[in-house]
Image (cartoon, helix red, strand yellow):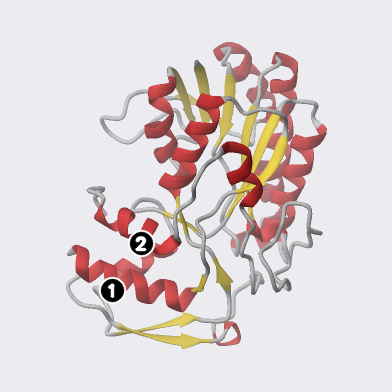
Amino acid sequence: MKLLLLGGNGQLGRELRRSLAPLGELIVTTRDGRLEAGSGAALPLDLSDLEAIAAVVDRVGPDAVVNATAYTAVDKAESERELAFRINAEAPAALAAACATAGIPLLHYSTDYVFDGQGTRPYREDDPTAPLGVYGESKLAGELAVQASGAGHLILRTAWVHALHGHNFLRTMLRLAGERDELRVVADQVGSPTPAWLIADVSARILADGVGPSALLHLTCTGECNWQEFASEIMRLGVASGRIGQAPKVIPISTAEYPTPARRPAYSVLDTRRLTERYGIELPRWQDALVRTLSAHDPL
């Protein structure tokens, strides 16, 4: 199998490089054509150059394309709407069109932010979408563009993604643990923390077994918590794993006490039953996944 992975330097892209490599030949793109030192070569592809996308797909001639690129600066998107839509909607549209022309499948990722967070049970794939901000709007537009492209596709919505590299909540909490005795963390937003390695491993298994008919599915860990509970578990396991020396006190606060430019969904737990039934994949509890993440040997 020859795979083309877009966005090899992101927190998900780095995990996909690991999980996809055993499947065959893996061609990776990054914005500047470079990977971190000692990680091999990459092709340059700036997704803001929409015309370059089809040229890369045509040049590589892959059996499938995996798109791990995204504009993920949720708050900054409120003032950079055009750029967010260029990367999250127009680029996936161009990529899907190229895949349709080549007759190859596209694996694309989306987000819980397509929902408004007013639900009281885990969101199913066919529940009405109602993004609260530009980031969610742009990702939803990307979903719709891929679905309308005519390309065979699998869109995986995920949530609360974290890793020991990149910019994410887990790394922020571990850093702050060494700087503060007390942390104030939002406790009225609920979701399912999901590590990048899990998304990458599930993606590799699906590609190895065959994507199957086009679909949009949900992929997260099982269980749910709020951000304060997630932070508290990070502190407990951070001490147990030796990643931090001591755990600061984690104080729950409301969203209103931590205002941000973009509104966040208050409840964004995703129902993953369709994915587990379709592919026979058992998803871990978020607590167990966090244990594995923090026990890894990845440097901070």
Q: Residue at x 72, y 42 (%)?
A: 89
User: What x and y, as percent, mark residue 118?
Assistant: 73, 73
User: What x and y, as percent, mark residue 278?
Assistant: 63, 39
When the figure is inspected, residue 159 is found, relative to residue 250, above or below; the finding is: above
Q: Residue at x 26, y 48 (%)?
A: 298
| Viewer-side residue, 240 vs 81 | 240
Drawn side of residue 82 relative to residue 76, left or right: right
| Alpha carbon separation for disc pair 1 and 2 | 14 Å
User: What x and y, as percent, mark residue 186?
Assistant: 51, 80
Q: Are marks 1 and 2 in contact (CB under 8 Å)?
A: no
One can see residue 79 in this view = no
When the figure is inspected, residue 176 is found, relative to residue 243, above or below; the finding is: below
When the figure is inspected, residue 290 is found, relative to residue 185, above or below; the finding is: above
Q: Residues within 10 Å of mark 2 (few under 14, many from 20)?
A: some
User: What x and y, as percent, mark residue 285?
Assistant: 45, 60
| Viewer-side residue, 66 vs 218 | 218
Q: Residue at label 2?
A: 171
Q: Residue at x 40, y 33 (%)?
A: 19
Amino acid type for the residue under numbered disc 2: Arg
The local secondary structure at tag 2 comes to helix
The local secondary structure at tag 1 comes to helix
Amino acid type for the residue under numbered disc 1: Arg
Drawn side of residue 186 relative to residue 144, left or right: left
Q: Earlier in the sequence, mark 1 or mark 2?
A: 2
Which mark is drawn over residue 102? none
Q: Residue at label 1?
A: 236
Drawn side of residue 170 relative to residue 124, left or right: left
Q: Nearer the viewer, mark 1 or mark 2?
A: 1
